[in-house]
Image (cartoon, rainbow, N blue to C red):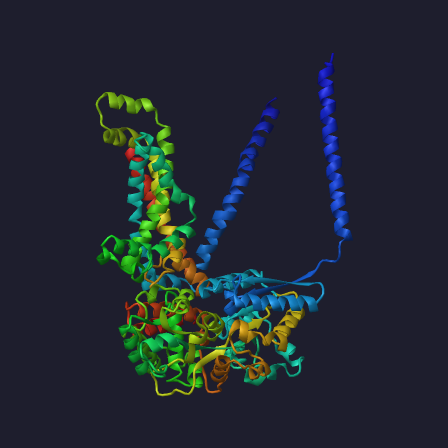
Amino acid sequence: MLAQHRQTRHAERFIGPLFALPAVALVGTFIAYPLGSLVYHSFTRWDGLRSPVWIGLHNYRTLFSDPLFGTALRNNLLFAISVPIVVCGSLVLAYLIHEEVFGWRVFRSLFFLPAVFSIVVVGILTNVTLQDNGPLNTVLRWVGLGFLTSNWLASASGAIPMITVAVIWANFGYTVLIYLAGMSTIDPQLAEAARVDGAGPWRILFRVYVPNMRRVLELALVINTIVAFASMLTYVYTITAGGPGFSTFSTEYLIYSTAFTFDQLGYASAMGVILTLILLAFGILQIRVLTRGAE
Amino acid sequence: MHLPMHNTTRRRASAVIATAIVCVAAGLALVSASSSSASPRATTLNVWLAGLLSYATPGSHYEQWYKEQVTAFEAANAGVTVNIQLLPSDNALAAAKLHAAFTSGNVPDVLMTFAGAYTTAYASELQPLNSYINATPGFYQSLSNWDGGCVGLNCQGGKGVVVGVPLGSAGNFLYYNKALFAKAGIKSPPTTYKQLIADCGLLNQHGIIPISYGDQEGYSSVNWLSQNMASYLNADQVRQLAVGKLKLTAPPIVASLNAVLSLRDSKCMQPDASTTKQADEISGFQAGKTAMLGLYTSVLPIVKKSLGSKLGMVKEPVSGPINTRIASASASEWSIPKGSSQKDLAWQWIKYVSGAKAQATVAPLIGDPPALRSAAAALQDPFLRLQTKWTTNPTNIGIIDVNIPNGVALYLYKELNLAFSGKITGTQALAASQAAWKRISP
């Protein structure tokens, strides 16, 4: 019996790893290998057609003095202004919808509608709207505000805020949905108790819902930060194509252009490594701050 | 003890399963029988169109041209199906697609790209065509504008490494609206920048936008720059540019660009020119809202259809001392990727589209003077004859963005757009592009 017990324990030692194997294979194939390849190629000069040539830290040295990379990173930081607006604004809207204020069904549909459109559609619509003779300037002239018209896309100072507005418009509804899902998991008696104690609606939001939705807030914050740093390519390409010149390039649009337009996959890999580290740092910081609050 | 009902249910289930298995087996048998008795699989020739014919969208003249060739080629080659795929007309997107194709080995049998560096950038992945050309007597001599399809952009009379076969000739011309010119009191089209700027003033006074310009991608600026460079540089100097012996910051090139930017300062272009796509710049001219358009030979059929008898066309005006040549190139190049498994059939396609029947319709449908010399000589349309006369001038220079490395050209477009937007000077744009050259194409 003891021998049988030993045999069973011996077999059990392999069952765990066996069950973990599919997940390990998936992570290895789709995360570990590409990441490892990215890091390796960041130390090479490679055009994708010929074999990569090891050049050590040359790409990183070039990167830190490359004004284009600096411009792209700066633009991503500007796009990140959308994050607090989306995170906080959609929380308030979600609360209003959750409390079923007058017209809540209409608000819910209206604000979720942009999330249904593909980003390409959002970008093209934005580009057309902001043309010199486009709908925005036309309406401004009609209502006597012609002095506000501008060739919005002709400079970074006009185009970047407009791209940010498009990002906010496209991501607002999706974040509202996330919050609504989070609010629906909170015991309604908590809010009711607070109401009975005389708490107003905003006090209930910030004292009842927000503390109980830290994980949801964390999710919304991380997702929208990733959008601002690593999902801007489609917006930038369809709205300004990175122009005028390179002035509205985002980091991943620069990575794409460097890799596939200028055939510098090694250099683009170095940019990718830096962007990954930046996003990792942001993510860890955000999660730590929110988790500490929960503790 | 068993329950009769339980047994009946089991029997029914078994019957259903057995029936299903029989049906599936019968179906599979039918499918395999029909496929085995079908005719032998047809051969498919995959043709990717970048370059000029990437604009062959449904209903366009370009589409009409290639469909005619596909129909004729399939009729002449039983069992062959020609599969056409359009690549993006955006040069950067097309370059990305081609790069991915060559890297992955998923290449077509025939590829069309813009001439010069757009073709030779992939020379290591393209089949040298010299053996095919030499095995086809008279083929090389029958066509013009070969240099854009050769390594080093110099075919050396056929002795160089040929990787591309030209479709037609191309250059930029100034199309103008005679009616709008008459309205502004302009008696003849401009030949110099001084005259052009004066005409811009007259047109503006009459509320007419002088020049349609779409520079969001930087294409309009590079086209006007190329044509103006022809008044300062000769062909050898432009070849030196290609190999880095002449810098982009050379005084003649800076002077050419600054002259183009002076047109903007003289309000020759529409206010949103820097954010208008090149594909959209033609619409203002077609609609009769702008007086002039500086664009390729290939837009001739389109503007002729829109303006009819109001259309005029001349060589683009220049600011430099030489007014006897233009910047020209082959319109586009046909090439065969090394990874093609049907190189012989691919060559048959290239021979067909370079032959008399196909080339006869290049000019009326695509708008470019045909590469086939006999077809070019037979042209009757005065606009086409004028284009042919200028694009086949032996003293012409190459178009700048097909003479410099592909990646550098794509970078240059961006810098030129920045200069045209007024964010940087022309000198800064050229200096930045020259600085990037070393990194992009060491």
Q: Position of residue A162 (x, y in %)?
A: 31, 53
- Please state which of residues A60 and B11 is positioned toward the viewer in this rendering: B11
Location of the C terminus of chain A by quadrant is: top left
Q: Position of residue A45 (x, y in %)?
A: 45, 65
Which residue is drawn at the image coordinates 47% and 48% (left, top)? A31
Residue A156: quadrant of the picture: bottom left
Q: Is residue A134 left or right of residue B122?
A: left
How many labels were placed on the picture? 0
Which residue is drawn at the image coordinates 35% and 49% (left, top)? A167
- Please state which of residues B379 and A101 is positioned toward the viewer in this rendering: B379
Is residue B90 positioned above or below A31 on the image? below
Q: Position of residue A157 (x, y in %)?
A: 27, 58
Location of the N terminus of chain A by quadrant is: top right
Regarding residue B176, the answer to whether it shows in the image is yes
Residue B248: quadrant of the picture: bottom left
Regarding residue A50, the answer to whether it shows in the image is no
Which residue is drawn at the image coordinates 34% and 46% (left, top)? A169
Which residue is drawn at the image coordinates 37% and 28% (left, top)? A185
- Please state which of residues A257 and B279 is positioned toward the viewer in this rendering: B279
Q: Is residue B433 left or right of residue B155?
A: left
Q: Position of residue A244 (x, y in %)?
A: 33, 64
Q: Residue furthest top?
A: B1
